Image (spheres, grey):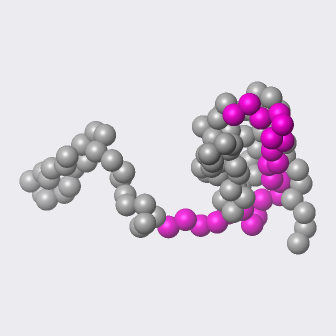
């Protein structure tokens, strides 16, 4: 539910939903300039979701049976590797193109 104030500005009430429509969001792939990238060892992953929670760019995607890294948007910051309790994610140097 939302309402407008006397100036006609739309006010957003708590828990109303998204701030913007997702089809209107512009995303810029930033993965092309990173110098390192995360690699996951699925045999060590415990599916705790810490990487998903702490990724500042939202580059960890929740799949049906695992978490996957979206390398198009990953900046290579390494936070996912640092927060992983099983050391399942490691950062490797990005190959030169």
> What's the magenta bit mostly, secondary-structure-wise?
loop
Provide residue 78's location: percent of width, then percent of height.
Answer: 76, 44
Provide residue 66's location: percent of width, then percent of height.
Answer: 69, 43
Q: Residue furthest front?
A: 65
Residue visible at 24% across and 43% down in the picture: 13
Closest to the observer, 74 or 45: 45
Left or right: 8 with respect to 23? left
Asked whether residue 69 is drawn in magenta, I would say no
Closest to the observer, 30 or 66: 66
Left or right: 21 with respect to 88? left
Closest to the observer, 70 or 65: 65
Position above or below: 46 against 17:
above
Whether residue 54 can be seen here: no
Instruction: Please identify the quarter of the rendering in which residue 24 is found.
Output: bottom left
Residue visible at 20% across and 46% down in the picture: 1
Position above or below: 4 against 28:
above
Q: Residue furthest top?
A: 85
Left or right: 67 with respect to 8? right
Magenta-highlighted residues = 26-47
Asked whether residue 32 is drawn in magenta, I would say yes
Provide residue 18's location: percent of width, then percent of height.
Answer: 36, 51
Instruction: Please identify the quarter of the rendering in which residue 90 is found.
Output: top right
- Where's the C terminus, which quadrant? bottom right
């Amino acid at each position: 539910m939302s309402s407008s104030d006397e100036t006609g500005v739309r006010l957003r009430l708590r828990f109303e939903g998204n701030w913007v429509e997702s089809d209107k969001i512009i995303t810029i792939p930033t993965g092309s300039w990173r110098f390192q990238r995360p690699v996951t060892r699925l045999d060590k992953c415990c599916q705790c979701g810490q990487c998903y929670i702490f990724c500042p760019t939202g580059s960890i995607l929740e799949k049906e049976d695992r978490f996957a890294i979206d390398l198009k948007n990953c900046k290579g910051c390494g936070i996912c590797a640092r927060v992983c309790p099983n050391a399942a994610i490691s950062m490797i140097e990005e190959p030169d193109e």
